[in-house]
């Protein structure tokens, strides 16, 4: 009798299991239907957030003004967009989950950001480096820069990476942290740049005349920027020539400097050749302590 009572008390009936599952599904569906208005409002908030982030581009342009650097305008646009999305997603989460307060949402977001920060350390490092570069770095899209073995034209500075078109044509994607941590030489920070070449004339030549000829030849070059001086100086006594340093100003782009250097070298060579002034090869004079006997060649019988 005791065993039959225990078997009757145990809820092992299949009908009871099915009824429990049915009640759970019905309750879950009822909660979902009850939350449909909140979900609709949340979706509407997300749509409005997207619209506000899109309109922030126009507002950022007005806020920055026309004279602001393009990189700074992009930074203001990104910061406004991030702020709008953070606010919109927080409001949407509070609407969907009524028990979630903004303080709890921000607290959970803070804990999540710490965990994600450890997992994606390099990504966030490049992100913040890109923010700082957009804020205060002196190079813009179109500038030629050099950093270590990297040299090329900046095509775009994004939040995480910078696109650099190398002078050989390849596109190089550089993490912003690499450019932020290392020295960067901005070749086109100014529209003009001073370059120089070294030359020399033989010791038998008149050095003063040679200096005047070289300066006249450089001044006549079309690639030289006329508002800047030409400087020609004798720098020392070389092993085979009197050394001369020639400097002038030209276009600051790599192609501009190459063209100008080519024109100046050709002009200097032509001017010195026309005047009959020698640009010497390296000379070597050998001195021997004792005369060197030279054997006479044996005469050939006739």
Image: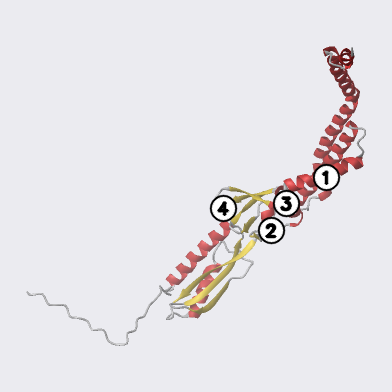
Dot 2 or dot 3: first in sequence order is 3
Say above or below: 114 vs 295: above
301 with respect to 169 (left or right):
left
Between the C-alphas of marks 1 and 4, the distance is 45 Å
Foreground disc of the pair 3, 4:
3
Q: Where does label 4 land, which residue?
A: 167
Say above or below: 55 vs 278: above
Q: Where does label 3 land, which residue?
A: 125
Q: Secondary structure at mark 2?
A: helix
Between the C-alphas of marks 1 and 3, the distance is 18 Å
Q: Where does label 1 land, which residue?
A: 111
Q: How is the image coloured?
A: secondary structure
Between the C-alphas of marks 1 and 2, the distance is 28 Å
Foreground disc of the pair 2, 4:
2
260 with respect to 227 (left or right):
left
Q: Secondary structure at mark 1?
A: helix
Say above or below: 230 vs 124: below
Spot the residue most to the left: 302
Dot 3 or dot 4: first in sequence order is 3
Residue at 83% from the left image edge and 46% from the top image edge: 62
Q: Would you call the spot at circle 3 few (<14 residues within 10 Å), some (14-19), or many (20 or more)?
A: some
Q: Where does label 2 land, which residue?
A: 181
Q: Is residue 159 visible?
A: no
Between the C-alphas of marks 2 and 4, the distance is 23 Å
- Quadrant of res 276: bottom left
């Amino acid at each position: 009798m005791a065993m039959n009572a225990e078997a009757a008390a145990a809820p092992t009936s299949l009908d009871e299991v099915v009824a429990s599952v049915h009640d759970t599904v019905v309750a879950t569906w009822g909660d979902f239907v009850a939350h449909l208005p909140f979900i609709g409002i949340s979706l509407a908030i997300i749509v409005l957030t997207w619209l506000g982030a899109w309109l922030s581009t126009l507002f950022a342009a007005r806020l920055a003004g026309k004279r602001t650097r393009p990189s700074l305008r992009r930074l203001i646009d990104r910061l406004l967009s991030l702020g709008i999305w953070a606010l919109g997603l927080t409001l949407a989460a509070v609407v969907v989950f009524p028990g979630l307060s903004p303080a709890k949402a921000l607290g959970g977001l803070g804990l999540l950001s710490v965990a994600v920060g450890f997992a994606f350390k390099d990504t966030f490092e490049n992100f913040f480096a890109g923010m700082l570069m957009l804020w205060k770095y002196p190079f813009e899209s179109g500038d030629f820069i050099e950093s270590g073995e990297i040299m090329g034209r900046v095509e775009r500075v994004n939040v995480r990476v910078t696109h650099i078109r190398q002078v050989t044509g390849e596109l190089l994607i550089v993490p912003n942290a690499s450019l932020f941590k290392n020295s960067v030489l901005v070749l086109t920070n100014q529209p003009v740049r001073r370059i120089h070449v070294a030359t020399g004339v033989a010791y038998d030549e008149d050095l003063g005349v040679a200096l005047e000829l070289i300066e006249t030849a450089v001044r006549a070059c079309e690639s030289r920027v006329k508002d800047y001086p030409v400087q020609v100086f004798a720098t020392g006594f070389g092993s085979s020539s009197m050394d001369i340093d020639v400097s002038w100003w030209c276009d600051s782009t790599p192609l501009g400097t190459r063209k100008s250097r080519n024109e100046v070298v050709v002009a200097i060579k032509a001017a010195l050749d026309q005047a009959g002034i020698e640009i010497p090869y390296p000379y070597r004079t050998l001195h021997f302590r004792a005369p060197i006997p030279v054997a006479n060649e044996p005469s050939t019988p006739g």
